[in-house]
Amino acid sequence: MATDPTTPPVGAPVLRYSLPPVRLPPEDILFCVDVDVEARAEMKAAAAAASSGSTSSSQPAGGARVGTRPPVRRMDAVKQAMLLFIHGKLAMCPDHRFAFAALGETVSMVKKDFSSDASSAIEAIHSISASESRYVTADLTQLFKIAHQEGRRAELQGRLLRVVLIYCRSSTKPQHHWPTKEKNFTLDIIYLHDKTGPDNCPQKVYDVLVDALEHVSQYEGYILESSQGLARVLFRHTCILLSHPLQRCIQDDIDFPKQVAKKTVAAEASQKEDGTPVSSQLSVV
Amino acid sequence: MSPCADAAAPASSSAPTLAPLIAAQLNYLLSHSKLPFKVWFPSIPSLPRLTLPLPVSRRSLAGDFVYNALYPKVAPDVVFGPDDEGFQPLVDYAEAGNGDKSCLAHWDCRDPGGLLALVEELRELYIEYQKRRVGEVDDARLAFELSTVLSKEGIEVCMVPPTDRPDEVKFAVPLLDMDYAKLVQGCPWRSPQKIHLQVIFPISRRVNTVPSAPRLKLMSTPELKSLFSVEDVKLPPWLNGMCLAEYLPSLEENLKVLIVEASASIGSRRRFIEALALPFGRPLEADPIFCRRATVLCISGVFTFLVCNKMPETSILSGFSVHFAIPLQFPKQQPVLILQSSQHCNVEGIPIMSPPINDYPWSPRWDVTEMVERIYDFLTDECQNFKKFCSDAITQQK
């Protein structure tokens, strides 16, 4: 790891980034996508703009739907996020590879062979669809079992295994019966959920996800969440996960993305608004 | 990577009827030899065919190593191509009276290293055979040149096949006996790297003419290219009447300087990447051995201040990655930047990327902190161009 894992005292500068000459293994990345009905929840209207690409500066007030475009659902944004991730990873190194799984009550493989071929990844992503019914449980045991096996195989091949779990349920706490074992894969989590209300418990779900991550992850795994329903936030979280586990700092010290702008007071104010690292509590919104 | 990594697979998986003794020898050969073999299986699956290349002189000694399916314990026959009809190693042995030196004389089918030993023996014999042929050429200049380099370890010479260009002889002169891997911390190379000078002399049987200059080309083993590119080297000119003994030393001095620079460039590139973290935050991923690439994640936005003293409004902040491709000749040559949007994609869902950018302000004399700050400043404007580029690309798709 490039930096000392112990957290520096508050106010102290983060340890300088260094790049020691140690081999960086290419990654085998297993996406696990939640296909519960909650993946069908609608994203905010601004998301519709993201998939067609225009990010104009005149936002309709109140986020009204633009024209008669169909609503963008979480699953659509998640698929786009995975495409973004794959192309971003391959642009950095063409040796990274990807496989895909879906999480209903338990995990099922969508594409179990790891491959760096973008078109077969695109095909696999398009084949995933959200269920029309709610699953009672979300059991991660099988996911960890598969990851552990693949982690062994990856290590023999000089590669590094990572699981990226994208979870969408606001009331269902995931569970697992995974014994404490040698950790041989890294776990990242993106948690998309509704705002906290009387009928849900996203904070509890989040805490369980954090525990699971700490229980299994070999290197520093990141957990990023959002209830805002904005695709651009999801895309930004996805891009943060592009970071290679062996070159990461601890989540509290994430200092990117930074704003590229002429340095003015307004620039720094906005930096805080959008660039705040994630804390252990869900963000207030 | 050389074909041997791919070729190793057929011996175990796609040739089901390969006799185990033969498979053992083939696997041993492929895992122990550093030469890039080509292995394939003609229609009869139990008979592998090997092409044995001589990579330095860039000729393939095409030897068909033919095992007998009925008698797999017997050593393979080796059949050479038409250009090498004169190569008859067993005849040479017989003439020299030391036929029992050949590994064919004591072939042990149970020895998995048997095939490798045979291949190496034939390769050595072939190199000697070519040396003799070249030595027989009636050209005084050539004979002289040959005498000055023949003692060099690893020298290879051969006749250029008559089907290509008539009357030429090719030398492959090894240069700079150096362990290049020592120059690269954490070096991943699997075999020693070498640089050769390929020299092609025209044969001139006429006396009293000024010998014409040879054609010269620098060659290296493939993995060395990640440190140093021989193609970028400008060869010193071959002056009239020169000979190799005069030409080689100054070439080697030249190369030594360039290689030291290439090695120092790794350190400069590493410091450049480390400096990126200051204005851009921690890079997403960077190449830690050769330091040729790094990627950072950025956001940008445009601010509009409302007239009536309200809070400044920002447009949606766009996220984008910046991929840095850092050339071998850094800092003389500047990094190439490619921007990749996280919010704009084409109809297939592929994020839009900018064309490569390398015309931003640059000076090799800046220290790395200034280099990265200048790139940051350049990007504050360039990302606006990029946003427009992305919007235009999307509009054109509609």
Image (cartoon, helix red, strand yellow):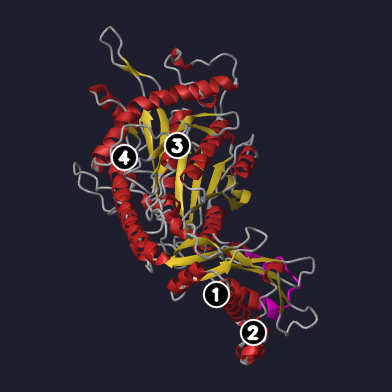
Q: Quadrant of residue B116?
A: bottom right
Query: Would you call the spot at circle 3 few (<14 residues within 10 Å), some (14-19), or many (20 or more)?
Result: some
For badge 1, the amino acid type reads Gly
Q: Chain of mark 3?
A: A
C-alpha distance separating marks 2 and 1: 16 Å
Compared to residue B25, the image places residue B392 above or below, namely above
Query: Would you call the spot at circle 2 few (<14 residues within 10 Å), some (14-19), or many (20 or more)?
Result: some
What segment carries the magenta color?
B7-24
| Residue carrying label 4 | B281
Query: Would you call the spot at circle 1 few (<14 residues within 10 Å), some (14-19), or many (20 or more)?
Result: some
Q: Position of residue B136 (x, y in %)?
A: 58, 75
**Left or right of B21, for residue B308:** left
Q: How many badges with numbers are in the image? A: 4
Compared to residue A20, the image places residue A270 above or below, namely above
Q: Quadrant of the N terminus of chain B?
A: bottom right
| Residue carrying label 3 | A201
